Structures are given as C-alpha cells and as structure tokens.
Image: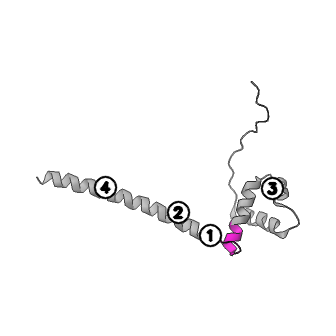
Amino acid sequence: MESVGKKRSRLRRAFTPEFKAEIVELCQRGDRTVAQVARDFDLTETAVRAWVKQADIDTGTRSDGLTSDERSELARLRAENRRLQQDVDILKRATAFFARETR
C-alpha cells in the first residue's frame, strides 16, 4: 500500500526568545499575514500564531491566558509540589516503619 498524501513528521526544533520576538514583530507590523511569515521562515503557522498570542498576553492586549512569568511560576510550583508530595510519602512510610519497630 502506498502512502498517498502523507507528510513526513518534522523534527522538533527549538527557537531562541529573540527569534520568536522578531517573528512576532513581523506579524504585528501588518504588512504580511501570519501564514506568509510562517512560510517565509519555514515555520508552522500554528507555532507562529501561538507566539503572537503569547506576546499579546504578555503585553496585556489579551487576557485569555497566563503570562510567560505566570507560566514559569506555575511550572516551578508544580515541581516543588511534586517534590513535597514525595517527601510526605517518605515520611509516612518512615512513620509506619518505626511504629512497627516500637511494638
């Protein structure tokens, strides 16, 4: 069976914040559409739209999401919460162990 119309998946690429800011600026200038900018720089339109949306949230023109600072704080708090939960689990096991030992 041949694969008709299947696109090859592309490797995940990482972009610097400076590059993203330049792309967002090009989109916000208004002389080219998001789709044109995405094509010109070999990017996915979805990624470019997400960068533009996040930039709008960060500057306060949109309020339907978390700012970049809030996102990083949330990630940090989730990691800390996960670590604290592990600590509590270890202490529960230690308490149960020593309670058995003292009997």
Amino acid type, mark 4: Ile
Q: Are marks 2 and 3 in contact (CB under 8 Å)?
A: no
Q: Can you identify the residue that label 3 sits on? A: 38
Which residue is situated farthest in the bottom direction here? 60
* Stretch in magenta: 54-66
Q: Position of residue 66 (x, y in %)?
A: 61, 68
Q: Residue at x 17, y 55 (%)?
A: 99
Instruction: Give the quarter of the image for residue 56.
Output: bottom right
Q: Name the amino acid, label 1.
A: Thr
The three-letter code of the residue at mark 2 reads Ala
Q: Which residue is mark 2?
A: 75
Whole-angstrom CA distance, mark 1 to mark 2, is 12 Å
Residue name at image x 37 percent, y 56 percent: 86
Q: Amino acid at mark 3?
A: Ala
Spatial CA span between label 2 and label 3: 28 Å
Q: How is the image coloured?
A: one colour
Q: Which residue position is annotated with label 1?
A: 67
Residue 37 image position (x, y, % from top left): 83, 58
